[in-house]
Amino acid sequence: MWDLTRTIAEDMPMHPGKPQPVLTALAEPERDGYGMSDYHFWNHTGTHIDGPRHFVAGAPGLETYPLERFITPARVVRARTGPVTAAMLAAVLGEDFRREAVILATGAGERFGTPAYFDFPVLSEDGARWLVLHETGMLAVDCASVDPVDTADFAIHRVLLGGDCLIIEELAYTPELPDRFQLVALPIKVLGSNGDPARVVGLPL
């Protein structure tokens, strides 16, 4: 198995504008006989899944999706420069590609913990539309977002989520992953969710 999930910690790198997590011990076994903690962080912190309600008014909450949407074969597209266009996706995945998840491996994850982590390639809008047209169930990226950090309109989010393509951001991608594997990405279950932290793992097919 491959663990593809970032550990949530108070000092973890955060997308500009997001607050740092605060993890407070309410009780300690050594002092109180049991352990209990209080966690404060945005639901789009660390490795997480964006649901349509993140940008689409009236969309269903992530908790309403069937479990099979979160357990799916995945294909890796390696792209260290961008934008990643429809033609580039078609060259790797083929025009008959349908329904599987896509992992966009940009190399940004190798820079996690440094300012360079927030400099990463993204999809072009026609690349995002290609994924929707080919019924891609989920796009996962090893960087902070599917849109550039300085985006004003979140165009890629809107195209993907508007086309019911779920998004995993901040994937802890590892180069040992094969080109195709089984992706398991289970979000915590919250009513009316627009996105949730998820434990994401890869399994051999």
Image (tube, rainbow, N blue to C red):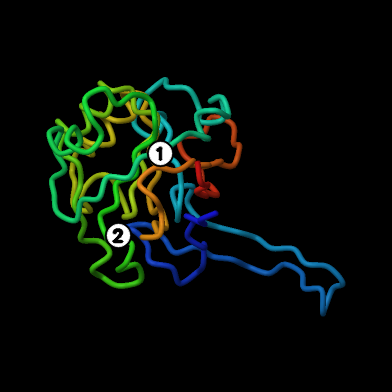
Q: Look at label 1 and name its amino acid.
A: Ala
Which quadrant would residue 81 be assigned to in this image?
Answer: bottom left
Q: Which labelled disc corresponds to residue 74?
A: 1
Mark 2, secondary structure of its residue: loop
Q: Label for residue 16? A: 2
Q: Residue furthest right?
A: 33
Instruction: Examine the image and state in which quarter residue 109 appears.
Output: bottom left
User: Which residue is more in the foreground, 109 or 176?
Assistant: 176
Q: Position of residue 160 (x, y in %)?
A: 29, 30
At x 50%, y 29%, the residue is 69
Specify whether 189 is left or right of 142: right
Q: Give 199 or 154, whichever is nearer the viewer.
A: 199
Judged left or right of residue 149, residue 70 is right
Tell me: residue 121, above or below residue 32.
above
For the view shown, which residue lies furthest in the bottom direction? 30
- Tag 1 and tag 2, C-beta contact below 8 Å: no
**Is disc 2 surrounded by few (<14), some (14 to 19) or many (20+) residues within 10 Å?**
few
Q: Which of the 4 image quarters holds residue 107?
A: bottom left
